[in-house]
Image (tube, rainbow, N blue to C red):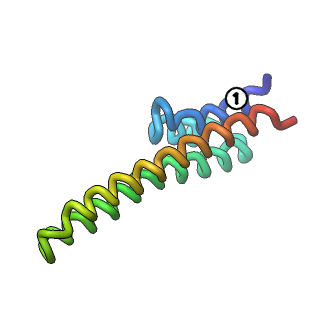
């Protein structure tokens, strides 16, 4: 098995064990441009759940200051949406990692 394909797929699989750390380390260690392209995609996909949690958290906290009655709605909607986004991103990373391993 090619080590570049293995590194690229591990960057996608790292969503399960080291979402930010592993792709950043691989980016600075490798010289292969194809691997760096996969690292950038994997790192971006690892940042998406963090962004949704941050945005929805700000909306929930902001709604607490505007109208205290809507806090549970934003809170539970934010948790549900963040959970869905996180599951989709994990599944996408696993599929992408498998596709990279299957490439010739």
Q: Pick the quarter of the image with the N terminus.
A: top right
Say whether residue 80 is left or right of residue 34.
Answer: left
Q: Do we see residue 16 in this rendering? A: yes
Is 15 rendered above or below residue 75?
Answer: above
List the single residue furthest toward the right.
104
Is 103 rendered above or below residue 84?
Answer: above
Q: Residue at x 35, y 55 (%)?
A: 53
Say whether residue 94 is left or right of residue 18.
Answer: right
Q: Do we see residue 47 in this rendering? A: no
Q: Residue at x 27, y 68 (%)?
A: 59
Residue nearest the observer in this picture, 45 or 60: 60
List the single residue furthest toward the top.
1
Q: Position of residue 83 (x, y in %)?
A: 42, 48
**Secondary structure state at the residue bearing disc 1:** helix
Q: Position of residue 22 (x, y in %)?
A: 51, 35
Q: Position of residue 27 (x, y in %)?
A: 58, 42
List the single residue furthest toward the bottom.
66
Q: Residue at x 66, y 46 (%)?
A: 38
Q: Position of residue 77 (x, y in %)?
A: 34, 60
């Amino acid at each position: 098995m090619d080590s570049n394909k293995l590194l690229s797929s591990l960057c996608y699989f790292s969503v399960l064990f080291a979402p930010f750390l592993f792709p950043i380390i691989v980016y600075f260690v490798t010289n292969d441009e194809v691997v760096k392209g996969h690292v950038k995609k994997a790192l971006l996909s690892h940042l998406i759940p963090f962004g949704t949690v941050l945005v929805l958290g700000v909306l929930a906290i902001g709604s607490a200051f505007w109208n205290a009655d809507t806090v549970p709605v934003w809170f539970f909607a934010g948790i549900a949406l963040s959970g869905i986004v996180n599951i989709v991103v994990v599944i996408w990373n696993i599929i992408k990692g498998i596709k990279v391993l299957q490439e010739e």
